[in-house]
Amino acid sequence: KELILNHNVEPDKICLAFNLIQNYSPLIRDVFTNFGIPYNLTDRYSLSTSPIVIALINFLEILENDFYYKNIFRALTGRWIKIDGLDLSNLLRVSSNLKIVSGYKNWIESVERTIEEIRFNNLDEDNRFLPLEFYTKVKVDIESIFKVLTPFREKKKILDFRDELRKLVFDLDLPKRIINDHPDYIEKNVKAVTVFLETLDELFELLAKENGVDKKYPLSLFLSQIKTALQFTRYNIKERHSSGVLITSVNEIRGLNFDYVFIGG
């Protein structure tokens, strides 16, 4: 920052090089952003850290863990997964009131039992119950989540599961939300979802070749395979040359000329 401000050095004349840049990427982003220094980081992002991909996995885990309340709130608290009309705060309120932990049937039966008790016994002397409409709304919301996840309840063939998962991405309007997101994040998120879909194609094609296209598997196996693949999948966004301090690996600066080179790590 002193070079840029006090010595009038152009940011693109400065390079910061690391041997293993991925070990420092999160720190680099935080420090350079906090100090307001323009930078061009060439490291790739891990697909397992993409908020959109995480949200999608969390959403499928609702079904895998049979509507465990923490999975529901983890998946739906963010800005990516939205179910039309769903009232998350009311869901939390009723879950706490009826002490519902998990089980789709348990959610429905507990709510229906409470609704029936309120209707046939208006004397709530202990103030145990919330207003009737709260429970009615939760029943509708839980059924709405269940409806979206219905295609994944039964065992599926490998390529059928892939097609259903791709369809879910569009049914949840994820592309639309990405495009309407903050301009600073659009390119990164578009690339993350694109690479995610490409990874699904590659992964399931390999699984189909290895295990055959006709055998059916449960959601848990597919999720396990996807999570493993995400750990080893990285993506990057388009490099912007001459847009700031170049931060890259030592191997990438061969043949390039800078006025100042810092070696990190």
Image: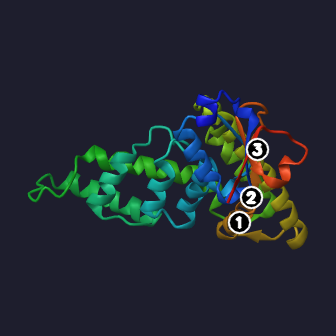
| Mark 1: secondary structure | helix
Seen in the picture, residue 121 relative to 207 is either above or below; the reply is: above
Query: What residue is pinned by disc 3?
Result: 194
Where is residue 153 shown, x and y percent of the image?
62, 62
Which amino acid type is shown beneath numbered disc 1? Phe
Q: Would you call the spot at circle 1 few (<14 residues within 10 Å), some (14-19), or many (20 or more)?
A: some
Where is residue 146 shown, x and y percent of the image?
53, 54
Query: What residue is pinned by disc 2?
Result: 161
* Residue 178 in view: no
* Of residues 218 and 35, the one drawn nearer to the viewer in this rendering: 35
Q: Which of the two discs, 2 and 3, labels the residue nearer the N terminus?
A: 2
The residue most toward the front is 7
Instruction: Tell which tag, 1 or 2, sits nearer the viewer.
Output: 1
| Mark 3: secondary structure | helix
Q: Would you call the spot at circle 2 few (<14 residues within 10 Å), some (14-19), or many (20 or more)?
A: many
Picture disc at residue 112: none
Which amino acid type is shown beneath numbered disc 2? Phe
